[in-house]
Image: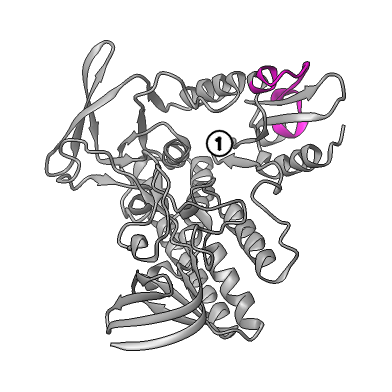
């Protein structure tokens, strides 16, 4: 067993981890970055989330515009998967070169703590231990698959990560889970040409969103031919050679949904399994995340956690900001925290995309604000008519006394870019 000592050990090649590795290495500090798989160089975003899914989203819109029969759509889908693979491979290689070019050492293998300063790494070439002055955990999150009867045995079941490796376009796709990931995939595959059904056990559609906007999204989703079953509980999955059946219980009785592919999109959970955090004395929250303070430091002073594993919002730009917070602890003033990073915008890449920052109308009223609501129908915007995308609405929630923006909810083309202006307005009190 080899032994090595570094000033800094980073577990996980995610956005925060790789950026921190490059930064510290360029400062002349010794850095080791551990990643469990060469296929994950660069982290979740570029390999199995943001980048490949948006590549497919773009290809799906082009395919929808091209039209044609299912055979033509299936051929375009195969090309889209090939392009997605080319793109992620290129980005993996660039990320590896960038980190190692800065002077950091990349170690392939699974990492688990031995004690507060030592980690055991098991890879294809055997095991080694690494001792470090400082350790940073950036292991991300993994898809959560609930215990559905028949799911583990089925050859037609996928997660959000494995679905994007499916070479053939499914004629019928059943998505279990009506959250943001499930709805994004529903939108992509509907545009590619699949017959899509979304099954969710809750009776409220995207309940975290503004109710008025959520109703618009639901109606438009149905208008696109996507089937939404709410208040439906999956009982079991039954496989056959070429397809499967998803049996669900609804208020109207039991229904059987035929599927060539089944996507389980029931959320993601922090990836801490096998890390042996107890050996380092690192505390974990009730929800299974690494417990951190507002500076992302764990209860062990020389160990930090960044990104999805720390239990915050699961966005790559949050992971990047986590890097900034930790960097500020190491070489800055120490004033950056999770509490002062401002309003966090996000987008759900439907067609058109749904973007949001700040409070909903109901949240603002519950907080005691005198609320004024501004609405603009997308159909009234000439550019939307040019795009032939007239569905949707832009909604702003404003403090009537001060005219400051409390929240913005845009369901329209290019909302993923526009919403950032509203973050600036909220953060800086622009009226």
- As for residue 421 lying within the magenta part, the answer is no
Secondary structure of residue under mark 1: loop
Comparing 145 with 297, the one in front is: 297
Horizontal relation, residue 174 to residue 15: left or right: left
Residue 317 is situated, as x and y percent measured from the top left of the image, at 61, 54
Residue 13 is situated, as x and y percent measured from the top left of the image, at 48, 68
Comparing 193 with 257, the one in front is: 257
Above or below for 146 versus 306: above
- As for residue 382 lying within the magenta part, the answer is yes
Q: Looking at the figure, which quarter contains the C terminus?
A: top right
Location of residue 242 by image quarter: top left
| Range drawn in magenta | 363-384
Name the residue: 47% across, 65% down. 88
Comparing 320 with 173, the one in front is: 320
Residue 51 is situated, as x and y percent measured from the top left of the image, at 52, 57
Which residue in the protein does label 1 denote?
351
Above or below for 157 versus 304: above
Location of residue 208 by image quarter: top right
Name the residue: 54% across, 75% down. 94
Horizontal relation, residue 228 to residue 208: left or right: left
Horizontal relation, residue 164 to residue 53: left or right: left
Q: Is residue 55 visible?
A: no
Above or below for 8 versus 213: below
Q: Residues within 10 Å of mark 1 (few under 14, many from 20)?
A: many
Name the residue: 84% across, 36% down. 429
């Amino acid at each position: 067993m080899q032994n090595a000592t570094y000033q800094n050990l980073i577990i996980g090649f995610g956005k925060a981890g790789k950026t921190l590795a490059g930064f510290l290495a360029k400062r002349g500090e010794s850095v080791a970055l551990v990643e469990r798989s060469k296929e994950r160089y660069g982290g979740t975003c570029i390999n199995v989330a943001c980048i490949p899914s948006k590549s497919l989203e773009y290809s799906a819109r082009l395919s929808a515009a091209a039209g044609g029969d299912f055979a033509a759509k299936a051929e375009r889908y195969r090309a889209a998967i090939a392009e997605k693979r080319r793109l992620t491979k290129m980005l993996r290689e660039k990320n590896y070169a960038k980190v190692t070019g800065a002077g950091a050492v990349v170690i392939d293998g699974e990492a688990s703590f031995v004690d507060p300063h030592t980690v055991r790494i098991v890879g294809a070439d055997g095991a080694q231990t690494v001792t470090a002055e400082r350790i940073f955990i950036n292991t991300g999150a993994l898809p959560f698959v609930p215990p559905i009867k028949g799911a583990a045995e089925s050859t037609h079941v996928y997660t959000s990560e494995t679905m994007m490796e499916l070479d053939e376009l499914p004629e019928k796709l059943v998505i279990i889970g009506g959250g943001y990931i499930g709805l994004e995939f529903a939108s992509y595959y509907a545009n590619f040409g699949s017959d899509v059904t979304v099954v969710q056990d809750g009776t409220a559609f995207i309940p975290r969103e503004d109710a008025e906007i959520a109703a618009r999204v639901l109606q438009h989703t149905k208008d696109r031919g996507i089937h939404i079953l709410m208040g439906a509980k999956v009982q079991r999955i039954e496989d056959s050679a070429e397809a499967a059946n998803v049996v669900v219980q609804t208020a109207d009785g039991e229904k059987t949904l035929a599927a060539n592919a089944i996507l389980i999109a029931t959320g993601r959970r922090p990836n801490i399994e096998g890390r042996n955090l107890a050996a380092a004395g690192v505390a974990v929250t009730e929800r299974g995340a690494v417990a951190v303070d507002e500076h992302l430091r764990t209860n062990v002073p020389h160990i930090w956690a960044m990104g999805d594993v720390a239990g915050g919002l699961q966005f790559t730009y949050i992971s990047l900001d986590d890097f900034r917070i930790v960097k500020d602890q190491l070489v800055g003033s120490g004033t950056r925290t999770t509490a002062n990073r401002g309003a966090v915008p996000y987008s759900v890449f439907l067609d058109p995309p749904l973007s949001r920052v700040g409070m909903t109308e109901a949240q603002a009223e519950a907080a005691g604000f005198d609320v004024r609501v501004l609405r603009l129908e997308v159909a009234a915007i000439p550019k939307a008519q040019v795009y032939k995308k007239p569905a949707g609405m832009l909604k702003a929630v404003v403090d009537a006394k001060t005219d400051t923006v409390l929240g913005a909810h845009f369901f329209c083309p290019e909302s993923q870019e526009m919403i950032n202006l509203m973050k600036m307005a909220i953060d800086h009190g622009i009226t």
